[in-house]
Amino acid sequence: MAGAGIFKHAGAALKLALLLCAAGPAWSQQPEVVRIATTAFAEAGKTALNGVAYRVQLDGWLEQELKKRGVRLEWFPVTGDTGATINEAFAGGRIDFASYGDLPSVILNAGNVRTHVVVPAGQGSDQFLLVPTSSTAKSIHDLKGKRISVHRGRPWELGFRHLLEDNRLKPTDFKLVNMDVKPGTAALASGAVDALFMINGYPVEDKGIGRIIWSSKGRIDRKMRAELWAKKDFTQNNPALTELVVTAWLRAQHWSAQDANRDAIIKDGTRNGTPESVVRRSYDDPTLPWKDRWSPLYDDVVYSHYRRVVAFAKEQNLIRKNLNADELLEPKFVNAAIKNLGLTTFWSAHKPVAAAPR
């Protein structure tokens, strides 16, 4: 929160912070700035925002509403290792909100930096299993005893575990090779591994490096998720400002959900150099209506997903502390914003899809 920077001595700042904590939220001052982190990339020599944040920035509504209240809006663009960078920024008090992934957020909360989801981000991202183009494998069952590259401890490893679970298989049925996506792709091309599990598999297939034999399309409950997270003490001390940020996100997601804006959203996806054909295929899922890709509802899929993420993180020793997954989800701001925007009947809750071996 703003205000701490006016103290020249750390001791004075700490003393005041302890007094404010003891007094409770009523004593907290309105911050001078709201800082939001999000993924970014280089565009025309400048850092450009990605995803829903880009639409929030273009709309300009949030910046204007904050300005009316004497509060600045600052974007915190992140490239490279998004999860680690945003976690460090949250821990260091440099950001109040962040649009990023599920597993890094769980790890952060297990380290006693408390955040929660204030806007679910709809569909999530698909994950893929690829084999060399010369391979005769048609399903995960054909790869038993083979070498599969999957980056351990990353969010998509949970997707790989889901694939095994849905097919009644175990990790010990394969020779798992722990590699990041880039070296894993090179290993697939050279034949050093028999398969690669990854996100964004279409470019690899288009380059003739591999062939997709499975994806999470058609399984809304098997996708990798990223949401808008917020520092818990910020939302508690500044509910009105939090509601503004959440409303801005819902305005952008509602705009994105309009069929008339589909081509604009696809064009947004090409700004980082991704071919349009890849972006279109990434969005193509006959089981998921375009509108529902942008749903901010806290439905069964969202709650079940985070319970699985927490259990996975504990099982893999990525966290030591037991977390209540439901406490990572705070729906009251979305519920209020949906009502205020007149969107109470616009989206429908998703239901988990029954697993089918593939």
Image (spheres, grey):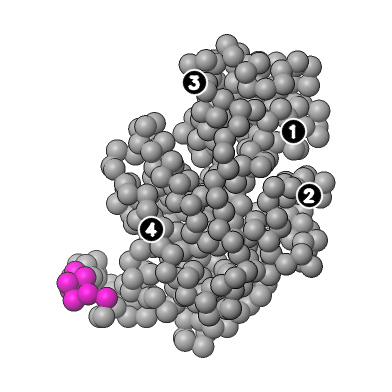
Disc 2 marks a residue whose amino acid type is Arg
Q: Nearer the viewer, residue 277 or 16?
A: 277
**Residue holding disc 4:** 115
Mark closest to the chain's N terminus, 4 or 3: 4
Q: Which residues are magenta?
A: 18-25
Q: Nearer the viewer, mark 2 or mark 4?
A: 2
**Residue 97 within the segment the image draws in magenta:** no
Q: Is residue 356 left or right of residue 256?
A: left
Alpha-carbon span between mark 1 and mark 2: 15 Å
**Residue holding disc 3:** 170
Disc 1 marks a residue whose amino acid type is Val
**Residue holding disc 2:** 280
Q: Is residue 82 left or right of residue 42?
A: left
For the residues bearing labels 1 and 4, Cβ distance under 8 angstroms: no
Label 3 secondary element: loop
Mark closest to the chain's N terminus, 1 or 3: 3
Alpha-carbon span between mark 2 and mark 3: 33 Å
Task: Tell me where residue 188 sits by quadrant.
Answer: top right
Mark closest to the chain's N terminus, 1 or 2: 1
Task: Tell me where residue 253 sits by quadrant.
Answer: bottom right
Q: Is residue 108 above or below residue 142?
A: below
Disc 3 marks a residue whose amino acid type is Lys
Mark closest to the chain's N terminus, 2 or 3: 3
Q: Position of residue 181 (x, y in %)?
A: 62, 32
**Residue holding disc 1:** 204
Q: Position of residue 250 (x, y in %)?
A: 58, 69
